[in-house]
Image (tube, grey):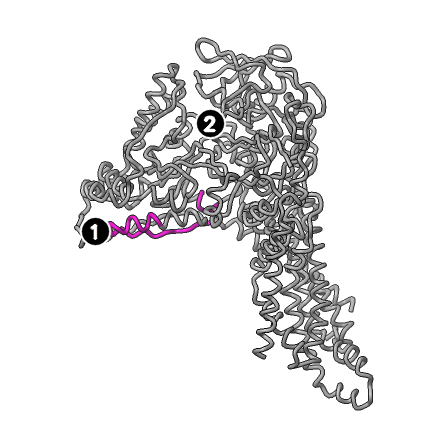
């Protein structure tokens, strides 16, 4: 197991380095630049800024300098606003993580429960209602859902203020973020639960007189959860990186908007930092998912 | 199954209707926290500002934050006129117009330390220093350099005589210099804090990157939740603090106009600086909607070196561009796209600008309300003069222009934006009358501004909002050496491009003119020369809209889009 993890960690580092190199060279190929303004900036100012941020050097040299700084723990400053990147990213991540974890937590609990109900009551009315709402949940784009929540809950009903500087409300963005994974997990659980319920070992257990609750929760559900775990790993990484749309509608300073605005601004240091940060999140999430398999399904053998 | 679906759908409808019904009770504007708090204004200007250092700011929303948290020698009053701020009175100007003397009021920074004339000397020299890399440092070009000034370490000829007197020497008389004294880049910055945060000289704006920095304006920033909100609190050391009744400004940092408009409608905001385009028609008659004329022009730029004019003489190319200009229905664009009462533009210098000689600058090159379909005959004449073939169509409302027997296609470049797209579509329809095809090329903002500056386009959407009220700020952008000369006048070797030497000479003459009456004449001459090329085809003059709740009074905006909140009053 530890040998396996070590191998995976080395592979992860290699992938992060590759991702960072591709991003670095690709972003330098996009036309435009970080100091482009509608009203032209004087060549002297551009020259000074290029010098300050090493942009006057050849791109490969810039990359080496950048990676050296990263190894020293220096993420640099944003070319757009001059603020240090690391505190900015971590504070944005704190917000995105709070929302993301809550959303995934709610989505998983409700999704697994609804999925199991749908499977156990297949073709009866609870199943049909669940299928209806999960289809709606997976089909509705997040900007529609988020706007709808804003207009109905905040504007029509007036339950939650649209803007409150002192107590930002995270309920609506969590709902907006959780609906899609919840619907997806429900469908996944239902399918794999149905599959598990038809397996021979369940029939055998039933024949041996195992209690129905034990049959469902211990024998069927445990096996049915493997696909859910497979989905959850990348989904957690994805949701933690924030959603530009949801953040924009609910005025949340998360990571999602950082990615999009940094690309629009050609804020090279910010693009790199967000990319590397996301790459790390992604590989960690994948690694944790694989380890989680082992606990859910002891048959999985890391050595082969 | 069908029954079930019907049941679910009707249930959902009943729920949403119930929601609508109860809304009438709960959306009572007085019930919100915002409305009951009369000492705080809840505002949205834009999303997170990039820089709060007044010397480094480049955006309109940043400038609005600057004028509320910093103050310079002069400022704008409610009437839109300049008035003394930290200056005791308007500056005394020497007879040759080149020396300005300003007596300062005794005032303090928000941390209680004295603010003296030396602070201005430091701040201005810092702004022009290349290490500071201030975009707006060019505004100091009119100020003379001291004897010990070098390129690497420029020193302005500005001296502090004692603590409260400032003597400023200019290169030439500058009729708009008073206005610059109210511009953010001319505001003082606290030397000790600036230098402490920037020991190596590579982080000039670091002192104002988080809440709590020292300022001298009506408000100081006390809380900043990045990308979410900012709280400014009244600065008791502000020179005019006794007249500031609003204690707090709370900014929602969002550029999502659906969200900000919802926040305004729900009563969570008192003031919004933008309205979603789709909602405009619903609010046009509202008393809460305010419209302010801006000194700026929306125009179409022709790249004078483009292949579109190949084989033409400069005169023919001009006639071609004029023909296109004739056919663009400006009134339709203003009425259907602009919608907020913009004025169709028949000149490049915006309506209401002053000529630097005490008068309003007036110019008009054509009747901009009558361009479009009523101008077809004129357009035909112009296209013929351009050496193009003009064939009459089946009826009088259309004709066909060709170049050497070939149909004409014009690529029109815009940045991704609904408004610009709609204007482009109007132009597309207008030119279809002459059988000219317009291809709309949409580019992402950063690429778009780069391509425009590099002249990598044929025709592009353009706009310019003046930084100060003087026509030179509109006209100098077309001088050959200007970085904003997107239409490439004077650049490149195209034989179809006009000779631009005389224009450059005119601009230089205006820079060094010592006689304001003569200068005003030169300005007109330059504009006439620019308009004669039809390289920059004006469409309309900008205006600025904002919405403000009826229980808020006293907020005012300048022609540059700066909003002043410090003299606002709010009732329940």
Q: Which residue is under mark 1?
A: B400
| Mark 1 / mark 2, whichever is N-terminal | 1
Q: Which residue is under mark 2?
A: B468
Q: Which residues are magenta?
A: B426-449
Provide the chain ID for the residue under circle 2.
B
Determine the residue positioned at 59% across, 33% down: B65
Circle 1: element type: strand
Quadrant in the picture for residue B356: top left
Asked if A289 appears above or below B404 in the picture, the reply is below
Asked if A62 appears above or below A121 in the picture, the reply is above
Look at the image and tell me in which quarter the N terminus of chain A lies: bottom right
Provide the chain ID for the residue under circle 1.
B
Q: Are marks 1 and 2 on the same chain?
A: yes
**Callout 1: few (<14), some (14-19), or many (20+) C-alpha neighbours within 10 Å?**
some
Instruction: Residue B351: give x, y in percent of width and height.
Output: 38, 30
In this rendering, would A49 be left or right of B524?
right
In this rendering, would B292 be left or right of B548?
left
Asked whether the beta carbons under mark 1 and mark 2 sit within 8 Å of each other, the answer is no
Depth order, front residue of A56/B125: B125
Determine the residue positioned at 64% across, 17% down: B116
């Amino acid at each position: 197991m530890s040998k396996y993890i070590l191998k995976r960690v080395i592979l992860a580092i290699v992938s992060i380095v590759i991702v960072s190199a591709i991003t670095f060279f690709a972003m330098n190929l996009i036309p435009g630049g970080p100091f482009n303004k509608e009203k032209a900036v004087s060549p002297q100012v551009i020259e000074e800024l290029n010098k300050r941020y090493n942009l006057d050097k050849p791109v490969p040299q810039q990359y080496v300098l950048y990676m050296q700084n990263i190894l020293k723990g220096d993420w640099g400053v944003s070319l757009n606003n001059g603020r240090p990147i690391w505190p900015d990213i971590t504070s944005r991540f704190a917000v995105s993580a709070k929302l993301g974890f809550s959303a995934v937590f709610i989505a998983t609990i409700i999704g697994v429960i609804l999925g199991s109900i749908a499977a156990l009551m297949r073709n009866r009315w609870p199943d049909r209602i669940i299928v209806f709402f999960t289809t709606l949940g997976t089909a509705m784009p997040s900007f529609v859902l988020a706007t709808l929540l804003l207009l109905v809950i905040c504007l029509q009903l007036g339950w939650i203020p649209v803007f409150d500087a002192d107590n930002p409300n995270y309920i609506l963005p969590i709902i907006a973020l959780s609906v899609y994974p919840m619907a997806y997990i429900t469908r996944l659980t239902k399918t794999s639960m149905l599959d598990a319920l038809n397996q021979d070992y369940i029939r055998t257990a039933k024949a041996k007189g195992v209690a129905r609750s034990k049959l469902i929760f211990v024998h069927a559900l445990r096996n049915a959860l493997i696909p859910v775990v497979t989905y959850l790993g990348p989904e957690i990484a994805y949701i933690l990186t924030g959603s530009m749309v949801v953040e924009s509608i609910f005025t949340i300073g998360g990571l999602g908007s950082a990615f999009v605005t940094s690309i629009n601004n050609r804020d090279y240091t910010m693009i790199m930092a967000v990319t590397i940060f996301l790459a790390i999140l992604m590989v960690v999430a994948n690694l944790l998912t694989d380890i989680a398999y082992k606990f859910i399904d002891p048959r999985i053998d890391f050595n082969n | 199954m069908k029954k079930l679906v019907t049941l679910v759908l009707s249930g959902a409808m009943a729920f949403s209707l119930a929601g609508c019904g109860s809304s009438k009770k709960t959306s009572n504007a007085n019930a919100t926290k915002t409305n009951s708090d009369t000492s705080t204004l809840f505002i949205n200007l834009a999303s997170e500002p990039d820089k709060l250092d007044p010397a480094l700011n480049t955006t309109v929303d940043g400038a609005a934050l600057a004028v509320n948290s910093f103050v310079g020698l002069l400022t704008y009053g409610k009437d839109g006129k300049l008035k003394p701020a930290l200056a005791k009175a308007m500056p005394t100007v020497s007879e040759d117009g080149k020396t300005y003397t300003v007596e300062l009021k005794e005032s303090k920074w928000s941390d209680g330390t004295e603010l003296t004339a030396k602070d201005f000397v430091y701040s201005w020299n810092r702004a022009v220093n290349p290490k500071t890399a201030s975009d707006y440092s060019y505004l100091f070009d009119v100020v003379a350099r001291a004897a010990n000034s070098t390129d690497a370490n420029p020193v302005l000829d500005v001296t502090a005589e004692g603590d409260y007197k400032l003597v400023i020497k200019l290169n030439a008389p500058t009729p708009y210099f008073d206005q610059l004294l109210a511009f953010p880049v001319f505001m003082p910055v606290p030397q000790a804090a600036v230098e402490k945060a920037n020991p190596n000289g590579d982080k000039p704006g670091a002192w104002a990157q988080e809440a709590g920095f020292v300022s001298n304006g009506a408000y100081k920033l006390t809380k900043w939740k990045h990308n979410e909100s900012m709280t400014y609190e009244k600065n008791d050391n502000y020179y005019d603090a006794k007249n500031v009744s609003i204690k707090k400004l709370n900014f929602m940092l969002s550029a999502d106009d659906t969200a900000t408009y919802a926040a305004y409608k729900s009563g969570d905001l008192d003031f919004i600086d933008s309205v979603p385009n789709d909602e405009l028609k619903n609010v046009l008659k509202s008393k809460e909607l305010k419209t302010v004329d801006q000194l700026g022009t929306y125009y179409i730029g022709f790249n004078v070196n483009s292949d579109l004019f190949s084989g033409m003489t400069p005169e023919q190319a001009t006639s071609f561009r004029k023909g296109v200009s004739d056919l663009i229905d400006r009134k339709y664009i203003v009425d259907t796209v602009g919608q907020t009462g913009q004025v169709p533009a028949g000149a490049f210098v915006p309506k209401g600008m002053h000529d630097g000689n005490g008068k309003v600058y007036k110019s008009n090159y054509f009747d901009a309300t009558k361009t479009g379909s009523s101008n077809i005959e004129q357009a035909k004449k112009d296209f013929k003069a351009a050496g193009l073939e003009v064939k009459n169509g089946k009826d009088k409302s259309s004709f066909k222009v060709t170049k050497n027997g070939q149909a004409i296609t014009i690529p029109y470049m815009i940045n991704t934006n609904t408004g610009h797209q709609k204007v482009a579509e109007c132009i597309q329809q207008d030119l279809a009358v002459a059988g000219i095809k317009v291809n709309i090329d949409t580019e992402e903002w950063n690429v778009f501004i780069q391509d425009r500056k590099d002249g990598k386009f044929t025709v592009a959407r353009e706009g310019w909002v003046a930084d100060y009220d003087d026509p030179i700020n509109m006209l100098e952008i077309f001088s050959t050496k200007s970085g904003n000369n997107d239409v490439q006048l004077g650049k490149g070797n195209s034989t179809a491009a006009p000779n631009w030497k005389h224009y450059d000479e005119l601009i230089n003459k205006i820079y060094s003119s010592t006689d304001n009456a003569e200068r005003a004449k030169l300005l007109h001459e330059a504009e006439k020369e620019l308009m004669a090329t039809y390289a920059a085809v004006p469409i309309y003059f900008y205006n600025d809209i904002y919405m403000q709740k009826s229980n808020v009074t006293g907020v005012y905006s300048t022609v540059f889009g700066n909003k002043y909140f410090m003299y606002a009053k709010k009732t329940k």
